[in-house]
Amino acid sequence: MVDNFVKLSEQIEEVNATVELLLKNVISKHESTSCIEVLELFHKDKKLYALPVVNDKDRPVGMIVRQNLTEFFSKQYVKELNGRKPITILMNDNPIIVDRNTNIDDVARIVLDAGMEYMVSGFIITKDKKYLGMANGYDLLNEMTQRKQKHLFGLAHFDQLTGLPNRTLLLDRLNQAIFVSTRASRAISLLFIDLDGFKPVNDTYGHATGDRLLKEVAERLVACLREGDTAARIGGDEFVVILPESNLDRAVTVADRILGTLRIPYEFGRKNISSISASIGIAEYPTHAGDLNSLLSAADNAMYVAKKSGKDRSTVFSPSID
């Protein structure tokens, strides 16, 4: 679908996600608060695992963990001796403290380097050095796991240069489109696109410029499509477009639109590249092919006819081409 660059932007946002994503509103206690008062807070709220300790300027100076406090005061005589003392006598005065804008990946490294006990106790988040909230290691671990899964999915299903679906995702979406088309008795159009004049760009200007050109080609392709269509890069300078619920007339119209936009010169600084066009093959399911592989083959064959016929044009598949 035409959500490829949305997906790519979401991936970029995830890379830059900050620890504020994990923020929990946990009440802080002043460093002068008595141990017994903090102990009572833990008794009242069984879900409360740790409390931050702040100074007069609301800046974190430590953290008190439920288990440590309750174990220390497990005997009555200990409460009588130390219960009224300030919580600073039992707090961890070296907790992990991070600014709210700290990248999640950086925080994960900090926590892992500090030790597993900090995964359990969590860490303090600040804004302008003042206490803002807390985050726990479980949420951090869960977030990292989800981000890793999304990253692996992206690597497996999206072209890393353009952000478009790759061949794997294209085949999956085409298979789904054929299934829906068969049930609804609606046609699917497939466009097989091969750039004309791309190799000389790499040879003349280098692969970095060639990559920039491919990225812009991808953007121009997406701009020619509607919501629900799919543009994919299947390798090199080859692209495929799926047009669900589309007849040949619309497919030809879209192909002409793509041809027009791709031949517009590409400007990269002082480089002006005006030699790019495309050869497009068009095939329709089920008119021209009865399955996924045959449909791709039909569009591919039609593309070669367009290229041999002079390039910068589209050709609709016919039995004579096959």
Image: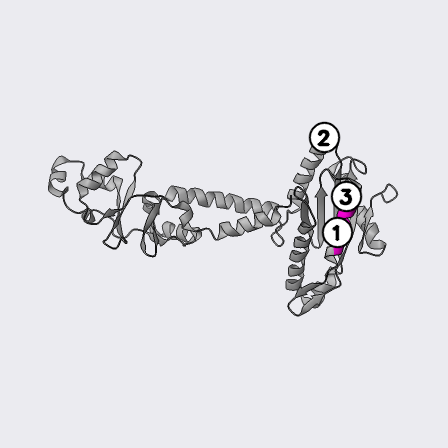
Residue 52 pos. (x, y %): 28, 47
User: The magenta stretch spans which residues?
Assistant: 250-260
Left or right, 43 with respect to 148, comes to left
Q: Secondary structure at mark 3?
A: helix
Q: Which tag is nearer the camera, tag 1 or tag 2?
A: 1
In front here: 320 or 249?
249
Question: What residue does disc 2 label?
Answer: 184
Residue 302, magenta (yes or no): no
Question: What residue does disc 1 label?
Answer: 257
Which three-letter amino acid code belongs to the residue tagged 3?
Arg
Q: CA distance from mark 1 to mark 2?
A: 27 Å
Q: In this orientation, does residue 216 appear?
A: yes
The dot on residue 129 is none
Q: Earlier in the sequence, mark 3 or mark 2?
A: 2
Residue drawn where x is 78% and y is 39% of the image? 247
Q: Which tag is nearer the camera, tag 3 or tag 2?
A: 3
